[in-house]
Each structure stands twice: as structure tokens, then as C-alpha cells.
Image (tube, coloured by chain):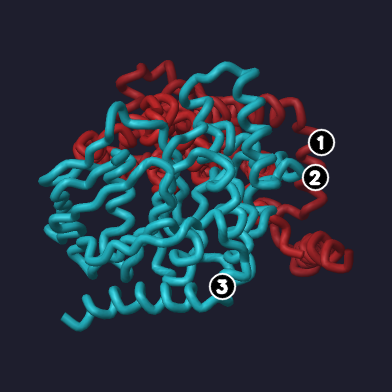
Chain colours: A cyan, B red
Amino acid sequence: MLLTFDHVTKRFPSGVEALKDANFAVADGEFVSLVGPSGCGKSTALRLIAGLTAPNTGAVKWAGTPPTLGFVFQDAALMPWATVEKNVRLPLELQRMEEAKIRDRVGEALNLVGLEAFARSYPRELSGGMRMRASIARALAADPKVLLMDEPFAALDELTRERLNDELRALWAGKNLTIVFVTHSIYESVYLSSRILVMSPRPGRVVADIAMDDPRARDPEFRATQIYGERCREVRAALKMREDT
Amino acid sequence: MRDRILAYGLPIFVAVAVVGFWEWAVGAFEVSPFVLPTPSAIATAVVTEWSSLAASAWVTIRITIVAFVLALVFGVAWAVIFAQSRTIERALFPYAVTLQVTPVVAIAPLILIWVGLDNAERAVLILATIVAFFPILANTTLGLRSADRGLHELFDLYGASRLQRLTRLQFPAALPYILAGMKISGGLALIGTVVAEFAAGSGTSTGLAWVIYESGFNLRIAKAFAALALLSAIGIAIYAALSLLERQLLKRWHESATSVE
């Protein structure tokens, strides 16, 4: 296993428990979705993986040295004063990479999300979907092994969200990338993931671990299939079960 | 287009109407020129007294600009220190407020004694800086803290240094706030210069405030009004320059600088 949550408990200074005794593991190359109700500690789990915060008890363990990470934040989190290109360059500049290499990487990342033509635009000149693409390009520019995504498409309209879902799945299929994807959308998780971890309301724990067929074989038609519907029902049942208890 | 004509035309129309009425009323009601000179007499005074007025205006402008720059430097520097630690901010902010709320007229005599009675200009400079300093400090402190939380975490994730975070995240995020503070401080620097000169400038000072004082004593009321008109012009010029700077720096990315169309 690439990443293991070993009896992780996280309490905020306010005393609220975000995660309680959370146990799960992520294997190399998986597309894992964390699904759960609002405030169930899914975002906290991502922050723990990224090392942005530390657990109170338990441990977040990597197999070997921690890999390069990319993080896509909920509301794109772009610097409004900088062009798309400068935003994408940021992680590389902070790591003091050499200029020629930065230019290559940034060009490649913008190409990957289809934003080459908007390199010199400012975030406020872009649509919500394009801003999210820029944010994804920024995360990819550092060439991460693991991509952490915190409800990246939650604020987008349905059509844009579906298009970006397809793009993301294609991206994952084309690279040797492990993705941990936080969402509260059952449909999105079923459409994208190779495995779904269902979390309980706060304090969050993993209450169901649902393995899926290989997402590489899927296409947009998958949303119309019977198996898709069954999977959605399964995830919903796991979410509901916790609400009732 | 119509909006532009109205935006510039209406204030000009008001000015012409008021000045015209003033000119007429002074004559019609036989107001003494020692109480209220006519606009034309003031304009004449600006021309005939130009060499003395311009010299005084230059003193006022110089002190105002230096005080403004000092306020900007100290305000931003102090805010940067605050941004490094909440503890420092908690310890020092009350004193910044104290400095701000203490009337400048009241501390003027003290400052004058400290810098020496023959150094009135330096006293005026210090007082004007104190007056102009606070809006920069308060706005910059707020601005440095206004950066998006996600961006802060991004900087954490890629191991940004304190300096990188300050220059690449906190300063740009604070820029609109700093510029807003500068617009307030620019006006305050001028007010501070004038008030400080009234309070501390007796004898050696030669700025516009002193011209007003002196002309009043000598019953050269038209000259006093001419100096007043120049002070207004300086204030307007400072505000216009800082507004232009703000628009230029923010126009591509900040909502406040986007034209409403």
C-alpha cells in the first residue's frame, strides 16, 4: 500500500473531532474517492495526507519516502493578481527549479488541460471551469505522483462538471497517477473512481469500502448503464445506513 | 459618452455658477474685501503674489511628500512586523492607536521642543508623518492577512520560505488595501503639514499655512484665499495621482478597478 491511515484521530483546537479512528489504505495508481456528508472530515483527511496538518493520535504512513504531491483546492485558489501562466509556474518557482525546465513543464501542464491560449489571461477573465483547469494544471506542473483533490468541481454547473470529470479520468488513465478525490457527489464518485471510501458524519470514519471496475474502460455512456445505477444505490445505501444509526 | 460629459460637466457647471454668484454677490451687497474678496481679486492675488506663494507652496508640497513617503515606509514596515506574529501585534497595536488618536495639535509643542525651536520644519515633518501613518499601518496589516487560505496552504505544500510567502503572496494580496490606505494618507499628510505648521511653525516656517496666518494678520485677505486655493489644488492633485496609480496597478485583476459598463 502506498498510503495508510492507521487509527487516525484529528481534533481541532475547538475540541471538535473531525476524524475518529480512521483506517484506510490507498494503493499505487488507484483513483480513490472519499464520499461523505458535509463536515465529515474528508477535507481534513486530505490535509493530513498533504502534511498540512498532523494527526492527534495514529499515523499517516507512506510506503518509502513521501512522493511529490499535487493539491487542487476547492475554489481553485488562484492568485488573482497573476496570469494563468504565472499561477502554474508558482510551485516550480517556489521549489527554485531552473527556468528552462519551468517553461517546459508549464507548457506541458497548460497543454494537458487545454489552456495554452489563455496563458496570459487573468483568473477573473476566465469561467469557473477554466479556473479549475488552471488549478489542475498548477497541481500537475510539479509532476506529482499523488494528486489530492478537495471537492474541485463542487461549484461548477452540471455540464462543465461532467466535461471536467471526463477530462480528469482521461488524465488519470494516461499517467501513472494516484488520485485521492474528495466529493459529496455520489454520481461523481461512481463515475470516476476505482474505489470508493464512504465516510460517516463527524467524527469521520470509513464505513464502507466499495471496489469498482476499472474506470479506464468507462466512457460517458457509462452513466446510462445498469451497473452505474447499482453502484450509486450501493454508495447511497452506505451513506444512509450511517445516518439512521 | 453622455455619462462622461455629465461626470465632468456637472461639477464644472456648479463651480462656474458658484464663482459667478460669489463675484456678483460681493459687489451687489457691498461686502468688505477684508471679509470676503471676490474670486477675481483672489485670482489676481495668485498672479501678483505668485513668487512668494509658489515658494511657500513648494515648502508645503515638499514636507507633505516626504511625510507621506515616511508614513508609507514606516506603516508598511510596521505592518510586516505585525504580520509575522500575532503576539507582537497584540503588544504594539494599542500604541499605534494611541499615536493616532492623540490630537496632533496637542503634541506639536512637545515635538517642537524635542527637535529644537529653530528646527520648525523638522517638527512639522514629524507631526505630518504621525498623522499620515496610521491608515497605512491599519490597511496594510489587514491586507497582509487577507490572502486566500487555499493559497497559504499551497505555499505550505511547496515549502515556501517566510520571505517567499511575504513577497509573493501577502504583499500582492495586500496591494489593494495598501493603495486604499495611501489615498487616505495622502490627504492626511497634507492636512498634517498644515495643522502642524499652524501649531508649531511660528517664526521660522514658510509653508502655505503660514502664509494664510500671516496674510490674515496683515489683512491681505485675498492672498490668504489664494493660499487656500493652492492648498486645495495640492490636495486634489495628490488624490488624483494616487487614484491613477491605484487604477494602473489593479486594473487587470481587481474588481475595484474595473469600470462599470
Q: Dot 3, crowdedness within 10 Å: few (<14), some or many (≥20)? A: some
What is the secondary structure assignment of the residue under circle 1?
helix
Quadrant occupied by the C terminus of chain A: bottom left
Q: On the image, numbered disc 2 is attached to which residue?
A: B43
Mark 1 vs mark 2, CA separation in Å: 7 Å
**Which of the 4 quarters of the picture holds residue B94?**
top left
Give the amino acid type for the residue marked by disc 1 in the picture.
Val
Find residue A234 and report its horizontal and vertical position in percent. Answer: 35, 75
Q: On the image, numbered disc 3 is attached to which residue?
A: A223
Above/below status of A237 relative to A19: below
Find residue A48 and report its horizontal and vertical position in percent. Answer: 27, 45
> Seen in the image, is B152 located left or right of residue B61?
left
Find residue A237 and report its horizontal and vertical position in percent. Answer: 31, 79
Query: Pointer 1 indicates a residue of which chain?
Result: B
What is the secondary structure assignment of the residue under circle 2?
helix
Q: Are the residues under marks 1 and 2 on the same chain?
A: yes
Give the amino acid type for the residue marked by disc 3 in the picture.
Arg
- In front of the other: A231 or B30: A231
- In front of the other: B220 or A23: A23
Residue A184 visible: yes
What is the secondary structure assignment of the residue under circle 3?
helix
Residue most toward the bottom? A244
Q: On the image, numbered disc 1 is attached to which residue?
A: B47
Above/below status of B171 relative to B222: above
- In front of the other: A178 or A162: A178
Q: What residue is rendered at 28% in x and 79% in y? A: A240
Above/below status of B69 relative to A80: above
Give the foreground label among 3 and 1: 3
